[in-house]
Amino acid sequence: MKKILVLLLVTLIFSCGESGKKLTVEATVKGLKKGTVYLKKVIDTTLVTVDSVTVNGDSNFTLQTEIDEPEVFHLYLDKNSKENDRISFFGDKGVTKIYTKLENFNFYAKIEGSKQQELYQEYLEMMNKINNKNLDVFKENLDALKNKDSAAIKKTEKALEGFTKRKYLYAVNFAINNKDSEVAPYIALSEIYDARLNLLDTINKVLTPEIKNSKYGKQLEDYISKRKAEEAK
């Protein structure tokens, strides 16, 4: 009896340990009747499929993968056509829930899961507001060019430059203010990788030791080192 109890205890501990290292994606795509959904992530600069499921009539499905630390995953939808849709999100150990619609797959996505995703979503929402205003000014600039209105051209071009600076400054400040999250180095690498080196270096220097040692923290350190070496030539 004792041996059985010990075996059951070991099995339970092992099972809990294994499940704790998994990312489970529970998704619903309203309107999806048939197609293949892929869960992907970037490994050594290559986008790799870590799980997939074939949907045939049921718009609810589950995907799983092993995970060691929070990182960005991509949910790809192949609808048996030339069009592919993608939802990107920050995944972590545990369950991430995604609800969306077949039409405008990415636009309607609602994601609940990691604290990193919540933070990243906050960043994206502000950037969308900035981008929407930028689009309005861009349209005004095109109209000015079409009408050959030099005063309007100058005004809108100056405004567009201001939007670009605002986007970069917001990204830098957001990363600095969230130096204890994996989102900070990820934003530096994915959103403002072409920013001035001193801005990226500022983000890198304030990251907490844990984040510096994370996947994106190490990548940011390596990227900055390579840029410094290139600029020193």
Image (cartoon, helix red, strand yellow):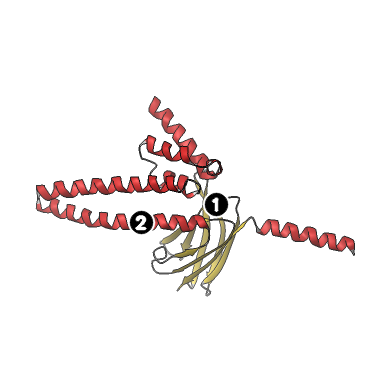
Mark 2 crowd level (few <14, some 14–19, many ≥20, 10 Å Cα): few
Q: Residue type at mark 2: give it.
A: Met
* Residue at image coords 69%, 56%: 17
The residue identified by callout 1 is: 70
Single out the residue that lies furthest toward the front.
Answer: 177
* Viewport quadrant of the C terminus: top left
Q: In which quadrant will I find the N terminus?
A: bottom right
Q: Residue at x 22, y 53 (%)?
A: 138
**Residue 197: x %, y % from top left:** 38, 35
The kind of secondary structure element at disc 2 is helix
Sequence-first disc among 1 and 2: 1
Residue at (48, 57) in percent of width and height? 117
Left or right: where 156 falls relative to 169:
left
Q: How many numbered circles are shown?
A: 2
Nearer the observer, 51 or 66:
66
Q: Compare residues 6 and 35 and report the one nearer the observer.
A: 6
* Name of the residue lying farthest toward the right: 1
Residue in the image at 46% along x and 44% along y: 185
Distance between mark 1 and mark 2 Cα atoms: 22 Å
